[in-house]
Structure formats: structure tokens, C-alpha cells
């Protein structure tokens, strides 16, 4: 890569001046001592010695320093061609030092980022295999017991098969969540903007989860009767996923005979806030900041029986952030939790058409 070098004469200029002055003083002293002091001669001598020194110094610098600097630039540019090549480069040492320092700094930041990413990748893989192992071993356990003779036992074989099947369900559940979160993180899933009635969407969600909720006698309700539709602009399918995840959590971590309530309120001019409130077990304060991390679960042992991948809230956060909206959580242990998120409100589409 050809680099333009802007020559700098400052160094040669100063060095030559120093040499000329020193020689002039020396010669002046000598002439004065010999009583032949001639100011004119001294001035001409100084001028010549300045000229000659300047010439020699500059030539030497060109030969021994500038070329090397240029090579350093060429090498650095090879590595970082995008950021360096566009600038004119000076042979001034100060600028070179600055450039190299900046280059080193940039590289350090880059290496740090890569290290963090690598760490995260290792973590992620570790977590995935850990999460998959438990249900896989469960399936294996039941199958082995069946093969070892339990198959003949009419009383237990169906029970074991049902349990193995449950573990397979859990595997599928985890893999689906993983699939979704990987896509979300690779930003493959773009927000498919559309206008829809959020109330209708919540109602459908309630219906789909009614069975699950009734097993724990948990009531899924609105905070009031919403007679009119509330239109929002978002990706309906993804928001459905958000509400499902929040509702499933409120059921999983809710108390028997509890209630999960959803409210949709106007926030500022063009925003609504959707709150999902339960009176379940709540979340201890120290866990709240990490709740949205992948695989993070408050109480590993207690939650195990509930199944789940610890990915639900991470998915929720991704989706809300892809919409450039915010998600909040408030929770008191033993009292309940409230998860809320904002969405962009849209005027009634029928009104827009008129
Ligand atoms: N409504 C809630 N009430 C109490 N704890 C909750 C609630 N929602 C989430 N949590 C806690 O946050 C953790 C993370 O939730 P999530 O990401 O959905 O993972 P999962 O449900 O698979 O465990 C849960 O394990 C649970 O401890
Ligand atoms: Mg969950």
C-alpha cells in the first residue's frame, strides 16, 4: 500500500541551527583570542555551516529515519488499512508515536471484546449442555428401566413412558427457546410491524393458558373491562410470545388460588404500558438485576420441578428491545411480582382511514 509521506524539516532545521550557533561561538572565541575578530566573516561562516548542516542532517534523516517510519506505517496500515490509509501521514515522530499508541489502544479494546465474547460463548455452551443433560438423563433412565424388565410390568410401564415423554417435552421446550434466542441474538428476526388490538391478543392468550392456570386455580383477568380495542403498532406474533412468557411465569411462580391481572394503560402521548401482575412467590431483591440474563433462575432447586429453561425472560427482553421499548420489573418476596413493558400506540386504524 502506497503511503504519502509529508516531510517535516523541523528537526533538521533546529539541529542545523544548533550546530551553526555552536560553531560560530567557538570560532568567534578563537578569533577574539587571536585578535582577528571579523564579524562579517563570522556571519558568512555561520550561514554556510547552517546550510551544510541542514543539508546533511536532512539527508541522513531521510535515509535512516523517514524510510523506517514509512515502513512502520506500511506495516500498521496493512493491519488497519481502513483507518490509516485515508489520512496523510507525516514523518514527524510525535504524530507517529500518537498513531501507534492509538493503534495499540484500539487493538487492546478489540482483544478485550473478543475475550468477553469468547467467555460468553463458553458460558453459553456450558449452560446449554447442562440444561439439556437433565431431561436427557431422565429419558434415558426411564427407557433403561423399561428395557431392564419394567416393560413387562403393566402397572408401571405407562407411567414411565408418560414421564419419559414429559422429559422429551422439556427438551423440545428448551431447544425451541434456544432456537428463538439464537435467532433474536443474531438479529435474524426482524420486527414485523403491524397494527393490532392488544386487548384481543391478550384475550386469546388467556384462553390458551386457561387450562394451565386452572390446574393451580389461578385466575387470569384484566384489571377492568376493556370495551374498546386498544391498537398498538408492533410485531403481533412476538408480543404474543412476550405475554405468553410473562403469563406462564406468573402461573409457574404463582400461588394456588392466586390471580394474574393484566392492565393496559396510556403512558405518555403515544405509548401504552402493559402490566402483568401476580400475587405469587415474588423475587428476592438481590436477584432482580440478573433476572433477564439467559439461563438465570432464582432458585435452581426449587424451580427445577417447574421446568423451564431460564430463557423466558431473556427472550422477552430481546423482543421488547427489538421494538425499542422498555421492560420493567417490580417484585416483593412473598407478595408478588409485576412485569410491565411499553408499546407504541396507534390510532384506531378505522379512524386513520377516514
Ligand atoms: N412472576 C414471577 N414470580 C416469581 N418469580 C419469577 C416470575 N417470573 C420469573 N421469575 C423468576 O425468574 C426466573 C427467570 O424466569 P425465566 O427467564 O422465565 O425462566 P424460567 O421460567 O424458565 O425459569 C425464574 O426462574 C423465576 O425464578
Ligand atoms: Mg419462564
Image (cartoon, helix red, strand yellow):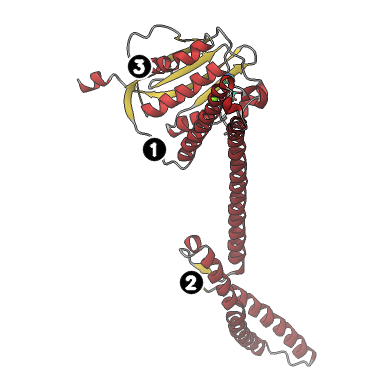
Q: Along the line of sight, which residue is nearer the eye, 126 or 189?
A: 126
Q: Along the line of sight, which residue is nearer the eye, 227 or 308?
A: 308
User: Are the residues flagged by discs 3 and 1 in contact, CB closer than 8 Å?
Assistant: no
Residue highlighted by disc 1: 190
| Above or below, 271 relative to 147 | above
Q: Residues within 10 Å of mark 1 (few under 14, many from 20)?
A: few
| Above or below, 4 relative to 138 | below
Q: Residue at x 37, y 16 (%)?
A: 199
User: Are the residues flagged by discs 3 and 2 in contact, CB closer than 8 Å?
Assistant: no
Give the CA distance from mark 3 to mark 2. 64 Å
Provide residue 181's location: percent of width, then percent of height.
49, 36
| Above or below, 98 relative to 16 | above
Task: Tell me where residue 257 sits by quadrant.
Answer: top right
Residue highlighted by disc 2: 3
Which label is found at residue 200? Answer: 3
Provide residue 241's location: percent of width, then percent of height.
44, 26
Provide residue 231's location: percent of width, then percent of height.
33, 20
Taking the view exactly as shown, the residue that stands out farthest to the left is 354
Q: What secondary structure is found at the residue carrying circle 2? A: loop
Amino acid at each position: 500500500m502506497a503511503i504519502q509521506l509529508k516531510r517535516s524539516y523541523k528537526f533538521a532545521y533546529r539541529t542545523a541551527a544548533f550546530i551553526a550557533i555552536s560553531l560560530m561561538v567557538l570560532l568567534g572565541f578563537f578569533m577574539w583570542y587571536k585578535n582577528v575578530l571579523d564579524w562579517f566573516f563570522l556571519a558568512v561562516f555561520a550561514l554556510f555551516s547552517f546550510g551544510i548542516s541542514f543539508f546533511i542532517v536532512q539527508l541522513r534523516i531521510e535515509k535512516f529515519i523517514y524510510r523506517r517510519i514509512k515502513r512502520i506505517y506500511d506495516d500498521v496500515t496493512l493491519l488497519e488499512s481502513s483507518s490509516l490509509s485515508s489520512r496523510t501521514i507525516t514523518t514527524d515522530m510525535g504524530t507517529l508515536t500518537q498513531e501507534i499508541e492509538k493503534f495499540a489502544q484500539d487493538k487492546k479494546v478489540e482483544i478485550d471484546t473478543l475475550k468477553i465474547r469468547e467467555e460468553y460463548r463458553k458460558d453459553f455452551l456450558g449452560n446449554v449442555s447442562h440444561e439439556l443433560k437433565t431431561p436427557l438423563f431422565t429419558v434415558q433412565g426411564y427407557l433403561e428401566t423399561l428395557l431392564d424388565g419394567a416393560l413387562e410390568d403393566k402397572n408401571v410401564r405407562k407411567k414411565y413412558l408418560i414421564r419419559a415423554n414429559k422429559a422429551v417435552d422439556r427438551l423440545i421446550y428448551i431447544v425451541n427457546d434456544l432456537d428463538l434466542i439464537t435467532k433474536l441474538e443474531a438479529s435474524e428476526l426482524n420486527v414485523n410491524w403491524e397494527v393490532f388490538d392488544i386487548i384481543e391478543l391478550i384475550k386469546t392468550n388467556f384462553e390458551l393458558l386457561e387450562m394451565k392456570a386452572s390446574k393451580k386455580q389461578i385466575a387470569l383477568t384484566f384489571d377492568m373491562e376493556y370495551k374498546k380495542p386498544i391498537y398498538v403498532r408492533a410485531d403481533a406474533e412476538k408480543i404474543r410470545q412476550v405475554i405468553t412468557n410473562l403469563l406462564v411465569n406468573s402461573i409457574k411462580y404463582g400461588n394456588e388460588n392466586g390471580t394474574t391481572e393484566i392492565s393496559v394503560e396510556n403512558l405518555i402521548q403515544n405509548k401504552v404500558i402493559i402490566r402483568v401482575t401476580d400475587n405469587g412467590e415474588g423475587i428476592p431483591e438481590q436477584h432482580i438485576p440478573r433476572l433477564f440474563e439467559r439461563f438465570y433462575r432464582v432458585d435452581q432447586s426449587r424451580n427445577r420441578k417447574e421446568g423451564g429453561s431460564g430463557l423466558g425472560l431473556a427472550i422477552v427482553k430481546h423482543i421488547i428491545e427489538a421494538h425499542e421499548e422498555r421492560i420493567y420489573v417490580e417484585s416483593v418476596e412473598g407478595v408478588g411480582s409485576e412485569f410491565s413493558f411499553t408499546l407504541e400506540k396507534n390510532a384506531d386504524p378505522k379512524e386513520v382511514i377516514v
